[in-house]
Image (cartoon, rainbow, N blue to C red):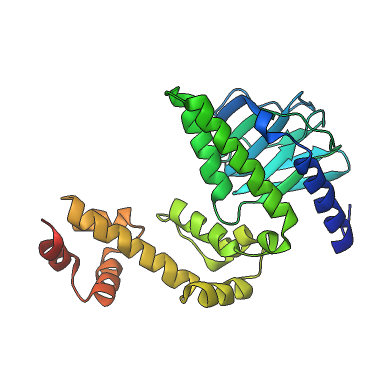
Amino acid sequence: MEYTQNSLNNDYKLILEHLSSTDISKAKMVFCEKITETSSIWNFNRHSHDFTEYIFILDGKMRIDVPGKKITKAQYDLIVYPKGVRHQEYVNMLERQQIICIGISAPCTIPLKTSYEMCDNNGVIRWLFEQIYLEHTKHALKGEEIIHTYIMAFFLHMQRYFADSESRQQNFIGRCTCYIHDHIKENISVEKLSKIAYVSPSHLARSFKKTLGVSPLQYIKACRIEIAKRLLVSTNTYIGDIAALAGFNDAKYFYRVFKAQTKMTPREYRNYYKT
């Protein structure tokens, strides 16, 4: 199905009406699970639920068939299946997959007949889902009340997202920085980040420079140096191993970059700052 901007705006309006008609004060979590490619609870048959299912993709990607559309979603995307909406997921179990799946029941006067999606551009949804999962698994005092507070914050965040076009279109830089911090040991290219952000490499580079004052590669390098600094002063780890832990494949290159950034060698930095 081809979507025009007007049809997308109409979809956003319907989603916002649906969310606004939901009584979040009575929202109750009925399911919470973190699922990986090795989990046995994946359901690949077409199915639906008597509650709303929220899937946040921490890693990997999936193709989804729902009424009226077929979509592919990946890391840092949220997929929502409203109550009664039949859906089917297709996942490559030979690749790394990690999601947090939460089921929430809440009274709603304006139902939706298909799924909807949103991008976690600033890391808020991820943080909320991880906190909900943490509270759910540790069974601590006041855990249910805390989970309910997180769920209310989640609903309010979704309402703001679909009410404000700028919140949907901007801050993909945050999406990229989340990915960088999660994958700092890996080879991260501008092309990879542009796919995560759904923009062209040139637009990503310009936006990074405008927003953060550095290029994507300079940001990655700075993050790796910060990791190295912390390891140098907080551990006795061999400096060559610290280079690898910080994401540098070449120890000589690490020494060169570290000295350019700090005006000290790694050993000098450790001797000066370590207590």
Q: How many marks?
A: 0
Q: Is residue 209 visible?
A: yes
Q: Is residue 238 visible?
A: no
- Residue 53: percent from left, percent from top: 70, 32
Relative to 30, is 214 above or below? Answer: below
Give the position of the C terminus as an image quadrant.
Answer: bottom left
- Residue 78: percent from left, percent from top: 66, 44
Residue 208 left/right relative to 119: left
The foreground one among 107 and 136 is: 107
Relative to 18, is 137 above or below? Answer: above
- Residue 171: percent from left, percent from top: 60, 63
Residue 17 left/right relative to 158: right
Q: Residue at x 52, y 28 (%)?
A: 145
Kindly indicate the quadrant of the structure image that contains residue 259.
Answer: bottom left
Q: Residue at x 48, y 74 (%)?
A: 215
Kindly indicate the quadrant of the structure image that contains residue 204.
Answer: bottom right
Q: Residue at x 56, y 57 (%)?
A: 175
Residue 259 left/right relative to 206: left
Kindly indicate the quadrant of the structure image that contains residue 17.
Answer: top right
Relative to 35, is 254 above or below? Answer: below
- Residue 106: percent from left, percent from top: 72, 29
The foreground one among 41 and 123 is: 123
